[in-house]
Image (tube, rainbow, N blue to C red):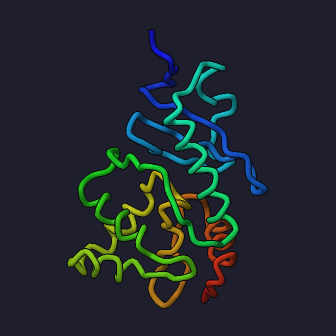
Amino acid sequence: MKNTAEGKNGVWKLPVQTTDGEFLAHYSVNGLCGLDFPYKQDPGNHTVNGARISSEIREWHKQTVKALESSLAGRMVNELPPLDLSCGTDFQQRVWRVLKSIACGKTLSYGEVADELGDRKAVRAVGRACGANPIPVLIPCHRVLASKQKIGGFSGGLDWKRKLLAREGVLLLE
């Protein structure tokens, strides 16, 4: 008999209460695989209906909560749970690795990310990969800007992007 319960498609969904609202963390058997902003959730779609969650996922969730709290406060994240980025293409995963390397309070342009990947012509593809990031905030796609320090887009909405960057001390040219 299983000692854990799985949500849809083998994914557990657990709420993360923050002062900015309730995020929803998604876990596969391999790690954190998604993070929803407070307004993007399906009401009542929290996972496991009181069933037991494995100690491994509970530990990952503690790490997620701590990392999200740090990030939302504009502080460096010291430790992330294992990340399951298998939903992305090889290119997207390469972009997300570059995003993870952008320090708190720093930014890169879409073009600079493309340069990091060795393909200056991939600027638009970088933008699409940022938009497809399944774990925003913790994989800091908000730190990627359009040229000349302009805000660009953000899957969580521009208000969230401005808020996250401001908390990190980043000044935008708008």
Q: Quadrant of residue 71?
A: bottom right
Q: Position of residue 28 (x, y in %)?
A: 43, 35
Q: Residue at x 38, y 39 (%)?
A: 30
Residue 101 picture quarter: bottom left
Seen at 29% across and 63% down, the residue is 94
Percent of width and height locating residue 87:
34, 45
Q: Quadrant of the N terminus?
A: top left
Residue 80, percent across and down? Answer: 49, 56
Answer above or below: position of 148 versus 40: below
Is residue 61 in sight in this rendering?
yes
Apparent side of residue 37 relative to residue 122 in the rendered image (left or right): right
Q: Residue at x 44, y 56 (%)?
A: 133
Can residue 174 be seen?
A: no
Q: Residue at x 63, y 55 (%)?
A: 66
Instruction: Please provide percent x and percent y for residue 163.
Output: 69, 71
Nearest the viewer among 95 and 102 is 102
Residue extending farthest to the left is 118
The answer to whether 126 appears left or right of 140 in the picture is: left
